[in-house]
């Protein structure tokens, strides 16, 4: 692949912009400055820098972020900053999208990709990808509430019964809830249906992926392919 084409696919600007970056000496490959935009490079795992910023070639972007509070999962936020403002410009230019959404006050594991087929694969209701939530409740969690969440509850203005595939108390006011569907404000509505209220919500797992303990709120990192997310079996 031509070096300028590689930079273009990674979101470093239009083709002419990428050619200019290289010709102006702003790109290094393997620690060596390259000023020929049309130099041939092997893209597989290629590490390079653009204006001193280190980057690794990924044919498709797939990354995980620890979403902080107070940001919206929208390109056009209404009341808070966009989650996309936390990503570097090359990823925004690649038009990465979040795989599903988290409410502005919900924290935790959020995935991004520029692979439309992958978004469908992990958000389709038919795929039953589990999502794990750590819930802080207003009122003490009771055995009856746990049982009802596992058996299934009716949500307001929704005729379908929804249930947790797993639910366990983790403290007097906390529980861990696993869902495979993704209705609007589902966790909050399910807790309301059993006469409780969500005071805090954090997603700790998605498929086989657990939010890395060393990933601080607002930070992100690359994932090496969908296999990092697919549940075993």
Image (tube, grey):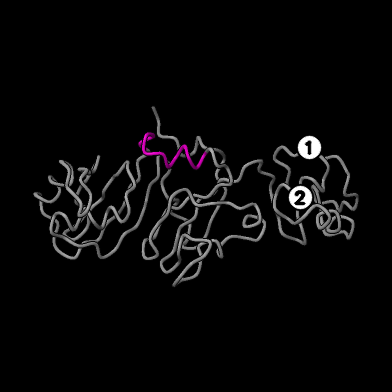
Q: Nearer the viewer, residue 8 or 145?
A: 8
Q: Indicate the position of residue 128 as horizontal and vertical percent values.
A: 35, 36
Tell me which residue sits at (20%, 43%) in the image.
161
Q: Are marks 2 and 1 in contact (CB under 8 Å)?
A: no
Q: Quadrant of the N terminus?
A: top right
Tell me which residue sits at (40%, 40%) in the image.
207
User: What is the span of residues highlighted in magenta in the rendered image?
Assistant: 118-128
Q: Helix or strand or loop: what does disc 2 sit on? A: helix
Q: Indicate the position of residue 216 as horizontal and vertical percent values.
A: 47, 61
Q: Helix or strand or loop: what does disc 1 sit on? A: loop
Could you tell whether 6 is left or right of 201 in the image? right
Q: Earlier in the sequence, mark 2 or mark 1?
A: 2
Q: Nearer the viewer, residue 183 or 224?
A: 183
Residue 119 is covered by the magenta coloring = yes
Tell me which residue sits at (53%, 61%) in the image.
75
**Location of residue 50 with respect to 163 vertically, above or below:** below
Q: Nearer the viewer, residue 30 or 146?
A: 146
Could you tell whether 74 is left or right of 195 in the image? right
- 10 Å neighbourhood of mark 1: few (<14), some, or many (≥20)? few
**Rounded to the nearest whole Å, what is the CA distance between mark 2 and mark 1?**
13 Å
User: Of the residues tagged 2 and 1, which is closer to the observer?
Assistant: 2
Residue under pointer 1:
42
Tell me which residue sits at (10%, 49%) in the image.
143
């Amino acid at each position: 692949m031509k070096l300028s084409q590689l930079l273009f696919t990674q979101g470093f600007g239009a083709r002419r912009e990428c050619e200019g970056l290289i010709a102006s000496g702003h790109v290094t490959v393997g620690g060596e400055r390259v000023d020929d935009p049309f130099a041939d490079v092997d893209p597989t795992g290629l590490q390079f820098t653009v204006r001193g910023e280190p980057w690794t070639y990924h044919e498709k972007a797939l990354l995980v972020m620890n979403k902080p509070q107070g940001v919206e999962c929208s390109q056009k936020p209404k009341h808070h900053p966009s989650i996309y403002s936390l990503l570097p410009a090359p990823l925004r230019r690649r038009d990465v999208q979040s795989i599903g959404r988290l409410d502005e006050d919900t924290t935790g594991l959020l995935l991004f990709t520029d692979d439309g087929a992958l978004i469908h694969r992990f958000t389709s209701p038919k795929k039953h990808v589990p999502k794990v939530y750590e819930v802080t409740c207003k009122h003490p969690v009771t055995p009856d509430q746990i049982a009802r969440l596992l058996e299934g509850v009716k949500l307001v203005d929704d005729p379908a019964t929804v249930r947790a595939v797993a639910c366990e108390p983790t403290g007097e006011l906390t529980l861990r809830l696993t869902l495979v569907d993704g209705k609007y404000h589902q966790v909050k509505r399910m807790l309301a249906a059993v006469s409780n209220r969500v005071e805090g919500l954090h997603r700790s797992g998605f498929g086989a992926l657990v939010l890395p303990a060393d990933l601080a709120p607002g930070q992100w990192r690359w994932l090496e392919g969908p296999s990092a997310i697919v549940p075993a079996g």
